[in-house]
Amino acid sequence: MNLSKSKFCNGVQCNKILWLDKYKSEFKEEIDNKNVLDNGTEVGIFAQKLFGPSKNVSFNSDLNKMIDETNNYLKEDNVIITEASFNYEGNFCSVDILKKERNQIYLYEVKSSTQISDIYIYDISYQYYVLKKLGFNIKKVFIVYINSNYIRHGELELNKLFNIKDVTDKAIDNLDYIESKIEEINNYMLQKDEPIKDIGLYCFKPYECPYFKYCSKHLPRNNVFDIRGMTINNKVNLYNKGIISFKELLNYDINEKYKEQIDFELNQKKEKIINDKIMSFINTITYPLYFLDFETFQESIPKYDDTYPYMQIPFQYSLHIMESKSSDIKHVEFLARGDCDPRRDLAISLINNIPKDVCVLAYNMSFEKSVIKALAHTFPDLSEHLMNIYNNIKDLMIPFKNRDYYNKEMKGSYSIKYVLPALFPDDPSLNYKNLEMVHNGSEASSTYQNLGKYSKEELENVRKNMLKYCELDTFAMVKIWQKINEIKEEK
């Protein structure tokens, strides 16, 4: 078959991905990796600037035109080419960055990751193989990736933002493997009947397979892969031992929390409520009470001073306020404009809306605390007030993480996205699916990063939907707080 470097890497993970792509693509599930792709594109653009002026090979569905354009550029003695394209016996690749110095070739594969994984080595090794077979004199091959320790101060320093790792020796060592793997893939793809391929770690690593649901259709409805919190290695090990169904797992030596999830779902158990522990938690909370939730975005290329790659940058928060148990609930919110660093305006808004020495509730407080601590570090003049908020945050997640309150609909999870519908299954006002445009944190982040692409007419509606999403996060916390308080009253 005709291979590209991405298809080859799919084959390294599992040959059947390629077979299903060709013969049964209707079973392919969509995996949300838009942010990853967007980051990859941006990183590629900045990495190219490391090498100075370059010639770019434009994408063309006719690959021969890309190859011809590459060959024209290669006539120069010294040249940098981006997306240089080659084909050897049906094995096609486009090189992120190719540098030619007289008759010597240097290959650079750009990754938006902060570390090098094995699949990246196979990726560049495949490119090395193709060009080597075509007779090019390849001097060195490199992987260009993000330096996670880089902190921006002033102008972007590309030489510090990127790490460049020489992996020539590994590419050379992989030559025989690449050749045999290509042959293996081609033979595999000749099969007309669906190949038999059991579930394994390759269904999840190095990437989540879009055909896992299809390939696992033989499994019982409740099985080892439905256990929340268990590592994928342990799940696969149990599967390989034939310990698959909930019934089989219930009698096996596994963590008691896993057994509890199985027991509740298998035997349709009702709620578990440990009143004393829940009341002990409630008694640590004081009024007035501030329910806080942040939305953040991450970027591979830091835009602002004192930020680093993939740092969580807050751009929005929602705050529900209860002055007392019986008082009306007040709501305030903040959403940055989207055209500049949002952090200082957000931090000022936050300290204006949350007084010192009040109890703040978050769900999974480690996230909110990390955001506030970073803001305090960046803005020393606001630090005292911000750290006061930090020191007074309590975690609404605790009763659910500890399983002091649990039911089968939580499916072993204490995430608010599971807890909320488990506690309020028939309340449409608490259903994230009923929101427009923004339904989760990933969509909120992506929408904010793309605000500049909307027209003025569209922007008002987009911002309204972003605010509704974040508001639901803290309103959900209010409802959960009220729910667990009912236990105290009933007792």
Image: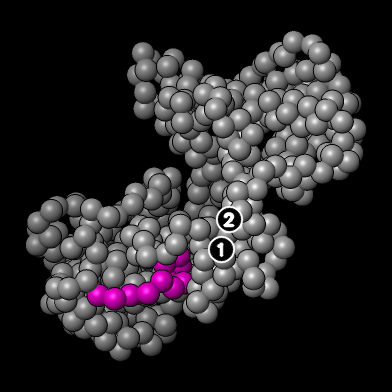
Q: Mark 2 points at which residue?
A: 266
Read off the residue under disc 1: 246
Q: Quadrant of the N terminus?
A: bottom left
Q: Where is residue 424 in the image (x, y as percent from the top left)?
A: 61, 30
Question: In the image, is residue 201 part of the stretch drawn in magenta?
Answer: yes
Query: Magenta part mainly helix, strand or loop?
Result: loop
| Image-based side of 297 in relation to 69, left or right | right
Give the magenta part as a residue range: 195-206
Mark 1: amino acid: Phe
Residue drawn at x 50%, y 49% as measured from the top left? 300
Q: In this rendering, would 236 be left or right of 384?
A: left
Would you say residue 18 is visible in this rendering? yes
Q: In which quarter of the image is residue 484?
A: top right
Residue 254 point in image, percent of width and height:
67, 69
Residue located 77% across and 42% down the image:
273
Q: Is mark 2 on a helix, strand or loop?
A: helix
Residue pictured at 49% horizontal, 40% vertical: 442
Q: Earlier in the sequence, mark 2 or mark 1?
A: 1
Q: Can residue 416 be seen in this view?
A: no
**Magenta stretch: residue 397 in it?**
no
Q: The C terminus lies in which quarter of the figure?
A: top right
Callout 2 touching callout 1 (CB < 8 Å):
yes
